[in-house]
Amino acid sequence: MHVNAADLQVIFQDSNAVEVALEVFDRTIAVNLRGHLLCTRLAIPQMLRRGGGAIVYTTSGAAFIGEPERPCYAMAKAGVNALMRHVASRWGRKGIRANAVAPGLVLTENNLKTMPEEVKKAALAHTRSTRLGAPDDIAATVVHLLSDDAAWINGQVISVDGGATIR
C-alpha cells in the first residue's frame, strides 16, 4: 500500500512558528499526518490477516533538513517518519514492512504548467543532478519498496530528490 497525501494549497500559508494561523497547522496535521494514521489503521489488520505486506508512506525532506518556513508541514512529515518507524518496529516480525519515500521537487503535469521557471531553476540549483524529478522517479522507488526485491528493507526513509539531501 502506498500512502500519499499532502495539501499543497495550504502549504503556501505555512509561514513560521510565531505567525502561522492555527487553522493552517490543524489542516496540515489533518491531511499530512492524521490521514496517514487513518490509512495505517485500516491496512494493518488486513495485512495481518494475509500474513504480511508492505506500506510506503510519502514524506518529505522538510522533515529532516530544517527550513526557515513551513514548520507545520515539516512537523507533519516528521510525524509520518515516526509513524513509519513505529509500524516497522511493531509489526516487522509479523511480516509487515514500512518505509517512506521523500521526494524532491517533482515536475508533475500541474507543476510543468504553473510553476515559474525561476522556481524550477532555484530547485535544480539545490540538487546534485542534471534535472528535476518526474513522477516516474517516485513511482519506481515506491514499486521497488512494495516488491519482494525490497524484502529486507524496513523502517527506512529513501530520499528521491536528485541528491538535494545527502545523509
Image (spheres, rainbow, N blue to C red):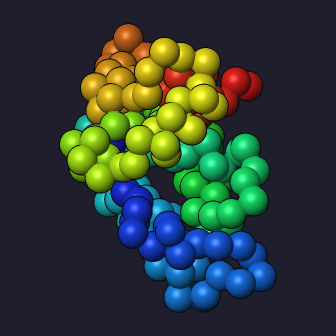
In this view, the residue in front, 17 or 101, is 17
* Side of 15 relative to 160 (left or right): right
Location of residue 166 by image quarter: top right
Give the quadrant of residue 41: bottom left
Quadrant of the image containing the N terminus: top left
The answer to whether any part of residue 141 appears in the image is: yes
Where does residue 135 sit, x and y in percent of width and height? 30, 32
Where 151 falls versus 156 (above or below)?
above
Q: Nearer the viewer, residue 102 or 37?
A: 102
Report the front residue among 41 and 25: 25
- Report x, y in % for residue 3: 36, 49
Q: Position of residue 145 (x, y in %)?
A: 40, 24
Residue 88 in sight in this render = no
Does 9 sit above or below residue 67?
below
Q: Residue at x 47, y 63 (%)?
A: 32
Q: Residue furthest top?
A: 149
- The answer to whether residue 23 is left or right of residue 50 is right
At 53% across and 30% down in the image, what residue appears? Answer: 124
Q: Quadrant of residue 159?
A: top right
